[in-house]
């Protein structure tokens, strides 16, 4: 038979043990939440508006963050490179030609701009899969202009039917130009790899 003192000591030990388990669980939960918040903040900072788009597209923040992290990991495995000065100059000259064509044939110029952007991307090392995969890959290094790429591509796709207003085509050229400028002058992203 245990004495009252032994029972009280056992009860006290159990209480302290339960409190210790609760404190450890709270501390672990705080660390987990802090890491999750830091990861979210890093992804939001890295992807900018693309982060919000991914959340809207996936519906759940955690799903969107998994997708964005997977994109970053995928692109990290690619061999994206900067263009040489000669390549940049060559592509810049090609772009001037595309712009010149816009005056006489805006729809043709939009198609040429789409092809030129794809050629620059391929030269830099981006895989040329379907459009959505290209846009996702570009979003890792150029998150601030990938939406321009999507908008320009959508207009280019519509212009294939021939009924796209000239103002829309002009806007597509502006969108393509924003990405094009980033792609031919994007030296900083490759140097960080």
Image: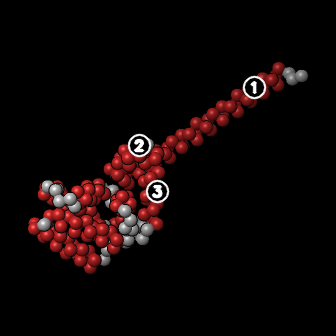
**Mark 2 surroundings within 10 Å by alpha-carbon count, few (fewer than 14), some (14 through 19), many (20 or more):** few
Q: Earlier in the sequence, mark 2 or mark 1?
A: 1
Q: Quadrant of the C terminus?
A: bottom left
Marks 3 and 1 in Cβ contact (< 8 Å): no
Residue 15, given in percent of the width and then of the height, sits at 70, 28
The CA span between labels 3 and 2 is 17 Å
Q: Is residue 44 above or below residue 12?
A: below
For the point 19% across and 75% down, which residue is it? 93
**Judging from the image, what secondary structure is the residue with disc 1 in?**
helix
Q: Quadrant of the N terminus?
A: top right
Which one is in front, 76 or 58?
58
Q: For mark 3, what is the residue? A: 70
Q: Earlier in the sequence, mark 3 or mark 1?
A: 1
> Mark 2 against mark 1, which lies toward the viewer?
2
Marking on residue 59: 2
Extreme residue in the top direction:
4
Residue 115, given in percent of the width and then of the height, sits at 26, 69
Residue 136, given in percent of the width and then of the height, sits at 37, 58
Q: Earlier in the sequence, mark 3 or mark 2?
A: 2
Marks 2 and 1 in Cβ contact (< 8 Å): no
Q: For mark 1, what is the residue? A: 11
The CA span between labels 3 and 1 is 50 Å
The CA span between labels 2 and 1 is 48 Å
């Amino acid at each position: 038979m245990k004495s009252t003192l032994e029972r009280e000591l056992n009860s006290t030990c159990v209480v302290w043990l339960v409190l210790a388990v609760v404190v450890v669980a709270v501390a672990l939960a705080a660390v987990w939440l802090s890491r999750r918040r830091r990861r979210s903040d890093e992804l939001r900072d890295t992807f900018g508006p693309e982060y919000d788009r991914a959340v809207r597209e996936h519906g759940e923040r955690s799903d969107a963050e998994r997708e964005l992290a997977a994109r970053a990991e995928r692109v990290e495995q690619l061999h994206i490179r900067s263009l040489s000065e000669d390549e940049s100059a060559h592509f810049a000259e090609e772009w001037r030609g595309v712009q010149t064509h816009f005056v006489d044939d805006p729809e043709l110029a939009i198609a040429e701009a789409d092809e030129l952007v794809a050629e620059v991307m391929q030269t830099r090392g981006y895989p040329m899969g379907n459009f959505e995969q290209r846009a996702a890959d570009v979003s890792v290094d150029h998150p601030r202009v990938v939406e321009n790429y999507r908008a320009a591509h959508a207009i280019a796709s519509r212009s294939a039917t021939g009924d796209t207003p000239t103002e829309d085509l002009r806007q597509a050229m502006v969108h393509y130009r924003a990405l094009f400028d980033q792609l031919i002058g994007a030296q900083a992203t490759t140097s960080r790899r």
